[in-house]
Amino acid sequence: MAVEIKEKNQVTTLPLMEDFYTIQGEGFYQGSAAYFIRLGGCDVGCVWCDVKESWDVHPSVSVDTMMERAKTSGTEIVVVTGGEPAMHDLTALTQTLNANGMRTHIETSGVYPLTGQWDWVCFSPKKFKEPHPSVFGQADELKVIVYNKSDFAWAEEFAAVVRPDCQLYLQPEWSKEKEMVPLIIDYVKANPQWQVSLQVHKYMNIP
Ligand code: SF4
């Protein structure tokens, strides 16, 4: 039975673009089964964004409905992504997921202070909008998308401000993959505190 813990005035519905059970294709949890909740809305405006549909208006769905659907998947890992999920107050969503035995992971560009309780924070800053400094110390994983050569120096600026135990990933932007992968390989060999992240779900043709 679902556990109810919500308090008065909490945001209990959120714009949902899609939710689905799949394999996490990127970063520290790459290869793990995970339930994805993709919330609508983003004002970051990355030119190479591969989920521009998330910018549109999406129907409001209750956090209980999202939790119930995630729970039936059988995985413990729920990844809240977008869009930019931190645009929304995620307190009730994370409380509901945690209270029902699920781990809460977020993928954010860090442009808004985080709300809610997170078991894992993937911070993926974007050049198109400055991140909020409160997110630096909360990041468990820093994932920088490499679109051109200057992104390595830019990635180091964030590596200098996250916690020392934060995992560092360089991931090629999908359309520049062939060009950027050799550069990332050389960079990681020279700077082994970084790791390569590839979007393996795209190779497996899964969402
Ligand atoms: S932050 Fe993410 S969803 Fe928003 S524009 Fe950039 S890539 Fe797209």
Image (cartoon, rainbow, N blue to C red):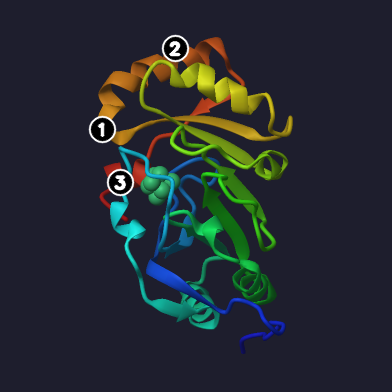
Q: Is residue 105 left or right of residue 3?
A: left
Q: Secondary structure at mark 2?
A: helix
> x and y percent of residue 55 in the render?
35, 57
Mark 3 C-beta closer than 8 Å to ligand 1? yes
Q: Secondary structure at mark 1?
A: helix
Where's the C terminus, which quadrant?
bottom left
Who comes first in sequence, dot 1 or dot 3? Answer: 3
> x and y percent of residue 106 in the render?
56, 54
Q: Residue at 56% across / 46% down in the picture? A: 111
Residue designated by label 1: 175
The answer to whether one can see residue 25 in this image is: no
Marks 2, 3: nearer the viewer? 3
Residue nearer the viewer, 10 or 145 = 10
Residue nearer the viewer, 45 or 185 = 45
Disc 2 to disc 3: CB gap under 8 Å: no
Q: Secondary structure at mark 3?
A: loop
Identity of the residue furthest to the bottom in this view? 1
Where's the N terminus, which quadrant?
bottom right
> x and y percent of residue 72 in the render?
48, 78
Residue 50 is tagged as 3
